[in-house]
Image: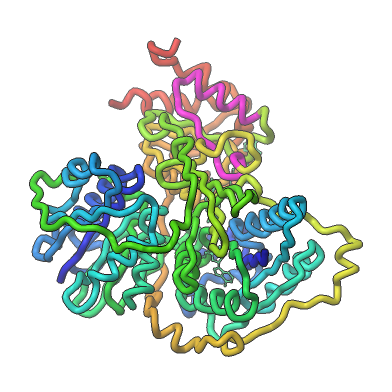
Amino acid sequence: MRFTAIIDGTIGSAVEQARALAGFLEEGLHAGAPGGPPGRPWSGLECETLAFYADDREREQLIALAPTIAVRLVRAPERRPDLLAATLAATAGEDGPDLFLFTSGQAGTEVAARLARRAGGSVLTGALDISLEPDRLLGRRQVYSNHMVGRFALTARPWCVAVDPGWAEARAPACEEHRVLSESDAIADASEPPFADLKLTDPPSAGDLAEARVVVVAGAGAGDRDGVARIAAAAERMGAAFGVTRPVAMNAWAPMERLIGVSGARVAPALAIVAGASGAPAFLWGIERAGVIVAVNSDEHAAIVGEADAVAVGDGVAVVEALAGLVAPPPDHG
Amino acid sequence: MRILVCFKVTPDYEALRDADWVAGPGDTVRSRYVRRVLNCFDESALELALRLREALTEREVAAGLGALSVGGRETEPFFATLHALGYERAARIEPEAALDYAPAATAALLAAYAQRFDRSDLLLLGSRCGPGDSGTVPALVAEELGWPCVTQVTEIEPTGGGLRVTCAADDGGLSLTVRPPCVLAVGNALVSHLRVPTLTDRLARRDLRADLLAPGDVGVDLAVALAGAPVTLEGLERIDRTRAGVVVEGDTPAEMARALFATHVEEAIARP
Ligand SMILES: Cc1cc2nc3c(=O)[nH]c(=O)nc-3n(C[C@H](O)[C@H](O)[C@H](O)COP(=O)(O)OP(=O)(O)OC[C@H]3O[C@@H](n4cnc5c(N)ncnc54)[C@H](O)[C@@H]3O)c2cc1C
Ligand SMILES: Nc1ncnc2c1ncn2[C@@H]1O[C@H](COP(=O)(O)O)[C@@H](O)[C@H]1O
């Protein structure tokens, strides 16, 4: 069986993509049933990385990032999922890979879906793990807005799988040795490029969230813009990073880059303090890797109560402000 | 410009009780008793389309609005609202089988309607919807039509030669100009609520109904579409996210904060 991992180096997230693929290969790809023992069961498979790049200066870095020894480089125009899909479809077929592995997000999901459609294969996005059987692929992913996990079977090849974004934090050891098998150009397209005047603006999410040791989150229970601002100020006093739930961002009570959850950032602090959030699974996904979760909610029946280590049943703003007074700010903060 | 918005109506999963999150017969979750809502991204798309038409009209560009859903009768009340808001075309395709986990078949129906029936120039979709949450329908529709696709769209504005679109790309906020025909999949747009129609508008358009179509009417053989992309749901599992959930004592915020600090916070912060 053969697989190809795809890195889209024409956009600025190649490092995160490579990390997610490496993490998935280390722990998410099984030869038996999902949940079986890890340990590179795929080492017997023929595997390679196909990296697209738009700028020659990215070549060396992409080779170094590849999660497999064998690497193929393909030069492609920037942000053209349709051309990437066409190029990959040309490699599919009888002697082509059984499995194409992508990351989630724009880089992976669109290309995976387009490729499956072009090559007559099947697509699974947001894969938590997969297992390869002789005649089918079994994979699990979140469904029902993260309330449940579904088990899916894919039969038609190639199997086009985009891995869950959570794999980006798996920190698998890098592949040290690489061999470039080929260099080529993506399938060209004579028609006019569909997008013009591309401008990249702000980063996808606030930089302080990813590495924070303490994160304080304000939910809709903060009540209004003022309540959210008071929780943000308390977070700053504690030297903590500040995040919000979707309704808070949607009300423009805080910038979108502060959003935590499946549609925003995923954090892994030692401590997460969550005030006024009900604990919906789409939000919880963003903080569930925290060492300790402490919640404040006025409703003792809120879902977050069972999802936290400790809970105060009370007013979110008042309790977080009181907590800020007890947490000594770190030396470089005051 | 003929704008078509594809939307889906789902049970309000947040209104489900904790005990209901178990897989019932046919791998579905019992959710009949909760109210129906517009998928959140589709709600943004429906409102963005109204605003886009206003902006186009200001520039003296003629624009028409259509709404399309693949689903059952539960969708009807939402069509009534859309008619009242000025959507002049509306269609519901009722499939013989549930397509919640069949994004390729759903996409085939949406694309066939857009191309053969509606002759749309611009398709607006949401970036994902439950219960399947595949997030692949917009790209599959674009692939069916051979159109470009922009995903995670947050703003749409008309410009001289096309549409200026802002989206949340993997590597940051991105704006670009795209010329219809194209597919736009709406993500975390700040415009997240569909406006409420006036009673007068509701009454004036209360007799309008969405066209009811079968897959065959748009030229799609559903059995073939389903067999063409065989991804089958084999089962559902509950995710266990429970932690200790210790409720701390205290009558005032200060007392509760002290209890949280003493039992959990201080130690968590000190841990290397
Ligand atoms: C496809 C999809 C993707 C999504 N992605 C995300 C995402 O990335 N991030 C995200 O957050 N959500 C996301 N959501 C939305 C998510 O499902 C929830 O709707 C959202 O997390 C709820 O936010 P909340 O807890 O702040 O608000 P609510 O659910 O309204 O909860 C407010 C809570 O505050 C409590 N409260 C009220 N007053 C007080 C007070 N004075 N003090 C303390 N507590 C109080 C209430 O008891 C309640 O529990 C997504 C949904 C979908 C469908
Ligand atoms: N049954 C449906 N009817 C109309 N539009 C749909 C349907 N299913 C999915 N869509 C559209 O496709 C988007 C993405 O859905 P999905 O890929 O299934 O997560 C949704 O936000 C809708 O805009």
Image quadrant of ligand 2?
Answer: bottom right
Q: Residue at x 40, y 23 (%)?
A: B266
Residue A128 visible in the current orientation: yes
**Which residue lies at the image location 39% right of the left edge and 56% below the top edge?**
A80
Residue at screen point 23% across, 69% down: A91
Q: How is the image coloured?
A: rainbow
Q: Nearer the viewer, residue B147 or A66?
A: B147
In the image, residue A290 sits, relative to residue A117, either above or below, namely above
Q: Quadrant of residue A103?
A: bottom left
| Residue B101 shows in this picture | no
Number of marks in the rendered image: 0
Q: Nearer the viewer, residue A274 or B4?
A: B4
Horizontal relation, residue A177 to residue B218: left or right: left
Q: Residue at x 33, y 67 (%)?
A: A86
- Rendering coords of residue A333 (x, y %): 43, 13
Residue A158: percent from the left, percent from the top?
Answer: 27, 73
In this rendered view, identify the residue nearer to me: B149 or B33. Answer: B149
From the image, give the main secondary structure of the stretch colored magenta. Answer: helix
Most foreground residue, A190 or B81: A190
Q: Does the magenta portion include B55?
A: no
Q: Position of residue A73 (x, y in %)?
A: 20, 54
Magenta stretch, residue numbers: A227-249
Placement of the N terminus of chain A among the 4 image quadrants: bottom left
Q: Can you say which quadrant of the picture contains the C terminus of chain A?
A: top left
A18 relative to A221 in the view: left or right? left
A185 with respect to A298 (left or right): left
Vertical placement of B4 versus A121: above or below? above
Q: Position of residue B20 (x, y in %)?
A: 54, 65
Q: Is residue A237 magenta?
A: yes
